[in-house]
Image (cartoon, helix red, strand yellow):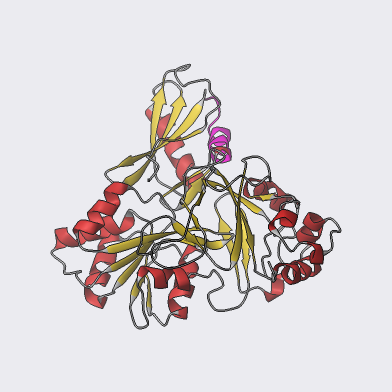
Amino acid sequence: MARLPGFLARAVAGSAHARQVMQGVPPAEIASRAALAQLPVTRKSDLIGAQAADPPFAGLNGIPVGQLARIFVSPGPIHEPQGEGVDTFRFARALHATGLRPGDIMQNCFAYHFTPAGFMLEGGARALGCPVIPAGTGNTEAQARAMAHLRPRAYSGTPDFLKTILERADELGLDVSSLRLGHVSGGAYLPSLRAFYADRGLTVLQSYATAECGVIAYESEAREGLILDEEVIVEIVRPGTGDPVPDGEVGEVVVTVFDDAYPLLRFATGDLSAVMPGASPCGRTNARIRGWMGRADQATKVRGLFVRPEMVAEVARQVPGLGRLRLVVSEDGGRDRMELRAEAPDDPALRERLLAALHGVTRLRGEVALVPPGSLPNDGKVVDDTRPIPA
């Protein structure tokens, strides 16, 4: 809170959006949680339309575009600026809590293509003095062979992809016993996956992060909730409002990020969580949240990427003449599964068109089921995430 007024002053000076959020309020007056809660929230769900109307960033950048280090394009699309600096997404502390130490090799299986996830984890590892294998996503056999040859101590990526790599290594008879640690994010870390990794003697911990905010909270060896990152201010608010809820009550995660290049003020992530009482048994003293507990809207993550109701609407626009559509996300053997159900007569050619549209819009491969007209519920639900919420 002592740093907040100075940060807000810089944000107002550099960001047209920050000036709009502050609405003439002197930054020096925002020095408490109560004062901060009086500012309006900026909703992630609004960024697509705002940036389309006011490219490239709808005024959210705090420095000129020409001074940025990178510009990311996440599904939606949503465009995120990154400034210069070491570990700008603040992952070093989270990786250290997982057990990484200087000299440990990390195989980074987050995407480097358009989205920031790969650079997020690489920045944290390099800040710790850890060499990084920029493996990216997919290519399971190549991932397994690289792991066997280069002998990394740590993996970073989505929760289920490590299981896929390890099982492929087993099939190929490869020795990947050097791997002892994993840091996962970008998807639900289900109990079945935790058990699988524990049975192999691996320490695999998770963090909660977004493309806009970087790391928000991370798990420690205590495995009791996620410890809030020390470089952000997190509020839990009643969904659809900006009003903070009492500690322990489930609400939407709202984050203020101390980043001069991308100064997010009360950024509503759309994710649900709750503050946990007390401090972590590991000894870290910052507040904890229960982790990801679902979405305040119908968006959800599949294999590290968001799928949103507006994406289903885009599929319907590309393939007209359908009845209701519902994108059902489920879990199958620790892996994410995605099926688009569409009310339409059974037609193999139509199914292929829908498969192509689904992949083109979401960048994810899924399945398509054509169901009889009138058979999907009339409940307004477009994205239905049926995966169990981790305890």
Q: Quadrant of residue 132?
A: bottom left
Placement of the C terminus among the 4 image quadrants:
top left
Between 113 and 13, the one lying in front of the other is 13
Give the x, y percent position of residue 262: 66, 65
Image location (x, y in percent) of residue 145: 23, 69
Residue 63 visible, this orientation? no
Q: Which residues are magenta?
A: 310-322
Q: Is residue 102 left or right of residue 228?
A: left
Q: Seen from this angle, which residue lies furthest right?
A: 24
Q: Where is residue 311 drawn, in percent x and y? A: 55, 41
The verdict on residue 316 being magenta is yes
In this rendered view, identify the residue nearer to me: 34 or 172. Answer: 34
Measuring 47% from the left and 49% from the top, which residue is drawn there? 292
Residue at 59 percent of width and 78 percent of height: 85
Name which residue lies at 47% across and 51% down. Answer: 305
Image coordinates of residue 89 in percent, x first then y, are 54, 68
User: Is 100 contained in the magenta span?
Assistant: no
Above/below status of 1 relative to 43:
below
